[in-house]
Amino acid sequence: MSRSLIISFILIIAGIAVFISASKDVSTYANFKQAAQGGKVKIVGQLAKDMPMVYDPQNTPNEFEFFLNDDEGVVKKVILHQPKPQDFEMSEQIVVTGELKDDVFNATEILMKCPSKYKNEEIEVKGDVSSL
């Protein structure tokens, strides 16, 4: 076998391995009740603003605790194994990826939908148009 054929074969095998490992990481959207069945899931919800948030960057910089209210109205404690995101309190919607263990959701990833900075401008424009 030629050297270029062997290298091509190794690259093809590596590509297949990367594809298979990436496809296993795909998690499904669920609520806390479905997450209790086990496995990695994504939970969509809103921050429970009346519950405490704990972040101590000096002692545990990669651990942020908060409470999330899922779409079914169930509130659970979430431990995010990352630093607290900037403007976290302003988020309209939160998506956390992880697993539910012992009634606590351990999140490894977070996505936040923040309010649009153009929202007030859109309201003003609509108000101006309707007053004409």
Image (spheres, grey):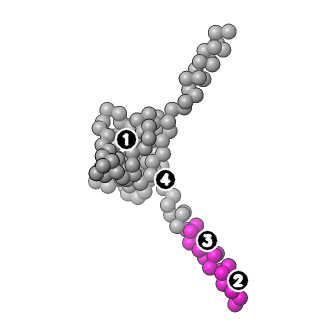
Q: Which residue is mark 1?
A: 68
Using the numbered discs, state the Cα–Cα distance from disc 4 to disc 3 in whole angstroms: 24 Å
Residue 24's place in the image compared with 117, above or below, is: below
Can residue 18 be seen by looking at this rendering?
yes
Is 42 or 72 nearer to us in this picture?
42
Question: Circle 4 sits on which residue?
Answer: 28
- Dominant SS of magenta comes to helix
Q: Residue furthest top?
A: 132
Disc 4 on helix, strand or loop? strand
How packed mark 3 is, by other alpha carbons closer than 10 Å (few <14, some 14-19, many 20 or more), is few
The mark nearer the N terminus, 1 or 3, is: 3
The residue at which mark 2 appears reads as: 4
Q: Earlier in the sequence, mark 4 or mark 2?
A: 2
In the rendered structure, which amino acid carries the disc numbered 4? Thr
First in sequence, mark 4 or 1: give its number. Answer: 4
| Amino acid type, label 3 | Gly
Dot 4 alpha-carbon crowd within 10 angstroms: few under 14, some 14 to 19, many 20 or more: few
Q: Which amino acid type corresponds to the residue marked 2 in the rendered image?
A: Ser
* Residue 120 forms part of the magenta stretch: no
Q: Nearer the viewer, mark 3 or mark 2?
A: 2
User: Which residue of the protein is positioned furthest toward the front in this rendering?
Assistant: 58
Instruction: Write down the region rendered in magenta.
Output: 1-20
Which amino acid type corresponds to the residue marked 1 in the rendered image?
Leu
Residue 63 seen in the figure? no
Whole-Å distance between the Cαs marked 3 and 2?
A: 16 Å
Comparing labels 1 and 3, the label whose residue is closer to the camera: 3
Is-magenta flag for residue 9? yes
Quadrant assignment, res 126: top right
As helix, strand or loop, the secondary structure at mark 2 comes to helix
- In the picture, measured across the screen, residue 22 lies left or right of residue 57, that is right
| Quadrant in which the C terminus appears | top right
Residue 35 percent across, percent down from the top left: 39, 51
